[in-house]
């Protein structure tokens, strides 16, 4: 492609960017009276082309040209906006004004050779502008605790994570602050998504959706909550048992995901045991679901806050302890000590030991031991939740939940023995 063709291509991209944003803005303001718009489709196209032209001129006369053109355009658009506002022909929003300035910047970026980045940014801009009603509805539905939780998640991930040292400390160099906190962020993010999946599903989705999405955040919390509801009303046992099984079944794909994110090689080793365990739980849940009426009672979500910093800090401390203890047992008792730790950890939590084993498998721990330990933890945790459901919820829910979870634990251990060993 010759130099002239490249210039025409970049200017064409700048024009297309302006037209794309202009079409969205024109459709949004299609009911406005003539002359009330800050800019129309043609104007946005020309603004994008103006940005591209100024970028080409700046190659010869310096970057100051772009800055002066941008300031001049901003002044012109502001003057038009103020005049329309004075005459009562425009609303007080400045979205279109900002969109026009962004169009100029993206046009200049395209002319500088970053056509893909500029085009992708233009598409995202058009989507953002076009989804105004949905965005406003989401913001209005957002509660104070949820907003603060989102900010906390950004705090622990964007602010704290990058400043932590990425090297080992303590005995056997087992404690890596960056690695530990990254895993805290990972689990907090998964739980955050699970919380909003439950909320977005709403009451109309029923207990089934609550169990399925709630298991993404905490299958233990779902099991405890639904078991308590079953203890109050035994008539709800069938549908609540379905919710518990779906939540417990979701734990196994989650275990596979968490381990694979840290070490991709664990995916193949854990895939068969995770599928076997999930199948043993999901299949009875689907059978229970088919036997129930479509009008299922709704059980409130057990997830009250999407993110608690105290919980995150507690998980970080637990994770550090498990990693340190795992290193100690590996040096003292070898692989058998790690498997014993996995079984003990599975009584309360699967994520901490799964993450610890996956992290250690990146260093000197054999992949087979790491995968086997994760399966052992998942099996023990399933047995504990089955016992919990029967002890708290009573016989009606215990007989529905206990056998599938027992089957999942047995199938997982058998699959691990045949597939991993």
Image (cartoon, helix red, strand yellow):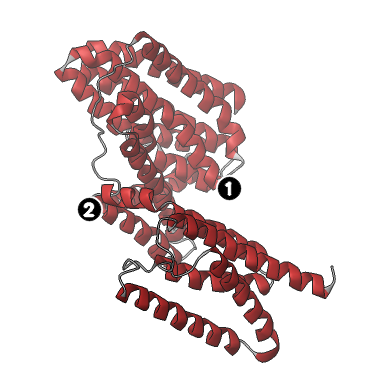
Q: Earlier in the sequence, mark 2 or mark 1?
A: 2
Rendering quarter of residue 11? bottom right
Q: Residue at x 38, y 29 (%)?
A: 212
Residue that label 1 marks: 364
Q: Residue furthest front?
A: 34
Nearest the eye: 185 or 110 = 110
In-image side of 288 versus 69 (left or right): left
**Looking at the image, is mark 2 or mark 1 nearer the viewer?**
2
Camera-nearest residue between 383 and 309: 309
Work out which quarter of the rendered image holds the C terminus and state it. top right
- Name the residue at the right extreme: 2
Could you tell me which secondary element the residue under label 1 belongs to? loop
In the image, residue 342 lies at what x, y percent?
A: 42, 35
Left or right of 66 on screen, residue 143: left
Instruction: Give how far across and how far down residue 183 sits, in percent.
Output: 43, 50
Q: From this view, report whether residue 118 is shown above or below residue 411.
A: below
**Residue beneath the point at 55% across and 73% down:** 104
Position of the N terminus by quadrant: bottom right
Percent coordinates x, y for residue 316 in the rendering: 35, 51
Residue 136 in sight in this render: yes
Q: Which residue is mark 2?
A: 144
User: Residue at the spot x=56%, y=73% of the render?
Assistant: 47
CB atoms of marks 2 and 1 within 8 Å: no
- Name the residue: 40% across, 81% down: 79
Q: SS of the residue at dot 2?
A: helix
Left or right of 88: which side holds 264? right
- Closer-to-camera residue (279/242): 242
Badge 1 crowding class, 10 Å Cα cut-off, few under 14, some 14 to 19, many 20 or more, is few
Number of numbered callouts drawn: 2
* Mark 2 residue crowding within 10 angstroms, few (<14) / some (14–19) / many (20+): few
């Amino acid at each position: 492609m010759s130099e002239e063709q490249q210039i025409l291509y970049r200017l064409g991209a700048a024009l297309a960017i302006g037209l794309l944003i202009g079409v969205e803005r024109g459709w949004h303001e299609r009911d406005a009276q003539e002359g009330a718009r800050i800019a129309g489709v043609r104007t946005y196209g020309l603004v994008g082309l103006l940005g591209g032209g100024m970028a080409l001129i700046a190659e010869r006369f310096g970057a100051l040209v772009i800055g002066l053109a941008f300031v001049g355009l901003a002044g012109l658009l502001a003057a038009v906006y103020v005049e329309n506002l004075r005459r009562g022909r425009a609303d007080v929003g400045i979205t279109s004004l900002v969109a026009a300035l962004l169009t100029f910047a993206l046009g200049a970026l395209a002319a500088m050779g970053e056509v893909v980045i500029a085009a992708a940014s233009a598409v995202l801009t058009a989507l953002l502008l076009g989804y105004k009603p949905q965005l406003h509805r989401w913001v209005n539905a957002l509660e104070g605790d949820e907003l603060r939780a989102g900010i906390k998640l950004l705090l622990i991930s964007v602010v704290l994570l990058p400043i932590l040292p990425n090297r080992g400390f303590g005995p056997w160099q087992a404690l890596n602050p960056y690695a530990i906190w990254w895993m805290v962020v990972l689990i907090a993010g998964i739980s955050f998504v699970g919380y909003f999946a439950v909320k977005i599903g709403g009451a109309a989705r029923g207990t089934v959706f609550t169990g399925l999405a709630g298991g993404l955040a905490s299958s233990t919390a779902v099991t405890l909550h639904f078991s308590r509801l079953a203890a109050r009303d035994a008539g709800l046992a069938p549908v609540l048992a379905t919710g518990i099984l779906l939540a417990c079944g979701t734990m196994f794909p989650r275990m596979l995901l968490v381990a694979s994110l840290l070490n991709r090689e664990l995916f193949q080793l854990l895939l068969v045991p995770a599928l076997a365990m999930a199948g043993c739980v999901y299949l009875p849940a689907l059978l229970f679901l088919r036997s129930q009426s479509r009008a299922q009672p709704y059980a409130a979500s057990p997830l009250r806050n999407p993110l608690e910093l105290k919980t995150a800090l507690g998980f970080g401390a637990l994770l550090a302890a498990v990693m340190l203890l795992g290193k100690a047992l590996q040096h003292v008792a070898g692989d058998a000590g790690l498997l014993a730790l996995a079984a003990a950890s599975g009584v309360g939590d699967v994520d901490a030991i799964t993450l610890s084993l996956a992290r250690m498998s990146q260093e000197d721990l054999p992949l087979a031991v790491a995968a086997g330990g994760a399966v052992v933890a998942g099996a023990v945790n399933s047995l504990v939740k089955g016992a919990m459901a029967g002890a708290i919820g009573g016989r009606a829910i215990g007989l529905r939940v206990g056998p599938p979870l027992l089957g999942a634990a047995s199938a997982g251990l058998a699959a691990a023995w045949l597939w991993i060993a």
